[in-house]
Amino acid sequence: MAYLLGVDTGGTYTDAVILDEEAGRVLGKAKSLTTRHDLAEGIGKAVDAALAAAGIAPAQVAMVSLSTTLATNALVEGQGGRVALIFIGFDGDDLGRSGLTEALKGDPVVRLAGGHGHAGNELAPLDLAALETQVRALGPEVMGFAVAARFATRNPAHEVAARDLIRAATGRPVTCSHELSAKLNGPKRALTAVLNARLIGMIDRLVTACEAHVASIGIDAPLMVVRGDGALISAAQVRERPIETILSGPAASIVGARFLTQAQDALVSDIGGTTTDVALLKDGLPEIDPEGARVGGFRTMVEAVAMRTTGLGGDSELHLVTQGLTGGLRLGPRRLIPVSLLATTEGAMVHAALDRWLSNDTAGEFDGRFVIPMGRAGGLSPRETAVLDRITRPMPQSQALTSRLEAAALERLVARGLVMLSGVTPSDASHVLGRLDAWDATAAEKALALMAKRRVGSGDRIAADGRALAQAVIDQLTAQTVDCLLEAAFGEDGFPEGQVANPLTRAGLRRHKGVLDLRLSLAVPVIGLGASAPSYYGAVGEVLGCPMILPEHAGVANAIGAVVGQVSQKAQGLVTSPGEGRFVAHLPEGLVTYPERDAALEALETALRNEAAARARAAGAEDLRVTAARDIRQAVVEGQPMFIEATVTVTASGRPRVAHG
């Protein structure tokens, strides 16, 4: 009998479950707060509690699998380490394509001549001496490098040479774009490589924390990690390619939803602390996004479940819209530490500040906000360093700033993940309304009462009291969740964007009945996942006029999905024809020319089968199933077919091997 341990590390909570693989049932589950200063602490508490609840010994665990939303959250919130892009053979205008400039956020770019043509021929030699000079200077200022060369998917030689030089010269991790995708579109590959490089440190800390704890308690089993397409890969592979874990948590939730409900057709909506993730189950399976995963406004080349990720969660930042006569509320996309949560560890400081602010007739700009130090890093400006030096412990935000100019510096520190903000969130509102009781409800009541004192354009308070504001926050969460689900539904049905704001849509939701009888509802049920789903999603189902499925283990669906998936590895390559009677197979070891098309295709498929199988075994799979597909593109010239090029894709998949059972 095999017992499997699933762990999901989210922005607020870390979940753990023990699954009896043979019986297909949950034996034990637990939650612990995610401890960002030391991820092993939160993981350890959740794992130990789940083992105790299941009544099994650590040595009985046959496999550990990890899913996470940390990478997704970092991209949604614009966080991550400083990186440098080595841009080989591209024009200056290419930096403005595919959102690459926005993704770089001012990080350094080294442009060099070089790259290859579409047939894999070298366009210009790569100046390795110039590259070495520049990367040695950049090494101390960045945490990693991304390398993208023109047509590297046709010939990766320049990316490989640059990677080897950078590793030798700096010791920093290097991401090559051709290792992440075999598709064309250089700027988009560069974007994906930049984001990957930005995430390496974060995911490495997570994997190390999980490995360290399970080893310390006597678990001797493989550690797997969920990719964004729901498949599993080994911990070693994810350290090199952390970008593949974007949408890891959401993908695991889809797998978990299918396991828990056996639903065939449904919208799955997973609300966490930072994001709400919506995907469609059709005939029991989710779709893979053909254009690559979109997260935080960036369209990557990462293969992942087709999912819409919105910066809306239980810990989303509450924005008060005070313009206009009536004002309003808006939630997200940034996650804050709820005031009620901060007060559980910093009660004296939090309550003293809230009492002081409440004693005033009006609320100041930073009243109700706190800052928490998260770490140190190089490459900071003098102003950023001065602000960070001041934040030696959790404190009111106003104490960390000496001028308005420093507010922007603080925002940059938050974006780097060096400081976290605490303020009012829907979780605080839920404590005020009695829906949650996990943290300090009194601190939440004070914080909401303080925010309710803010005034709108008419001069009136934004809410009569803290309880009224708390209800307005929950109503706003319901409204934005409805919009997330409607956007997904309209998109699946092929409607153009913007339909959610259409007056007819809003009237249909209100069940307008006049000369027109308008009703709008979802034709499929919604599976609500996440610890707070039972608290919020009943009202969502009422607005959308659809069944709301809330499975028994909805709060740990991600952790369940982490251990019921399969390992899957894909290898892809090209056959091109630079001239009559010449067919070039772009093999993993280089370009080989054949006189016949079929010979080139057979050679490529054989090489890719070996590569995919080797990757799958390295990822921890056994009993492999290997499939191949050929996409041959031809043109008709004078009534005769003419070969253009062919793409061969080989997929190897299987269940992860386990240590026992």
Image (spheres, rainbow, N blue to C red):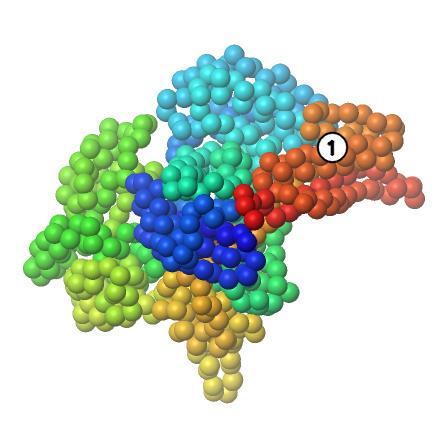
- Residue furthest to the bottom in view is 515
Above-or-below relation of 269 to 373: below
Where does label 1 land, which residue? 607
Q: Position of residue 79 (x, y in %)?
A: 38, 41
Q: How many marks?
A: 1
Q: Is residue 15 left or right of residue 259?
A: left
Residue at the (38%, 42%) spot, across then down: 217
**Residue 20 seen:** yes
Residue at the (47%, 33%) spot, across then down: 197
Where, by quadrant of the figure, is residue 300 drawn? top right
Q: Amino acid at mark 1?
A: Ala
Q: Is residue 473 left or right of residue 168?
A: left
Q: Position of residue 416 (x, y in %)?
A: 34, 38
Above-or-below relation of 387 to 357: above
Residue at the (30%, 38%) spot, across then down: 418
Q: Tag 1's secondary structure?
A: helix
Q: Position of residue 138 (x, y in %)?
A: 41, 21
**Residue 14 seen:** no
Q: Position of residue 436 (x, y in %)?
A: 28, 66
Query: For the residue carrying disc 1, how many other residues have a C-alpha within 10 Å: few (<14), some (14-19), or many (20+)?
Result: some
Q: Nearer the viewer, residue 596 or 20?
A: 20
- Residue furthest to the right in view is 639
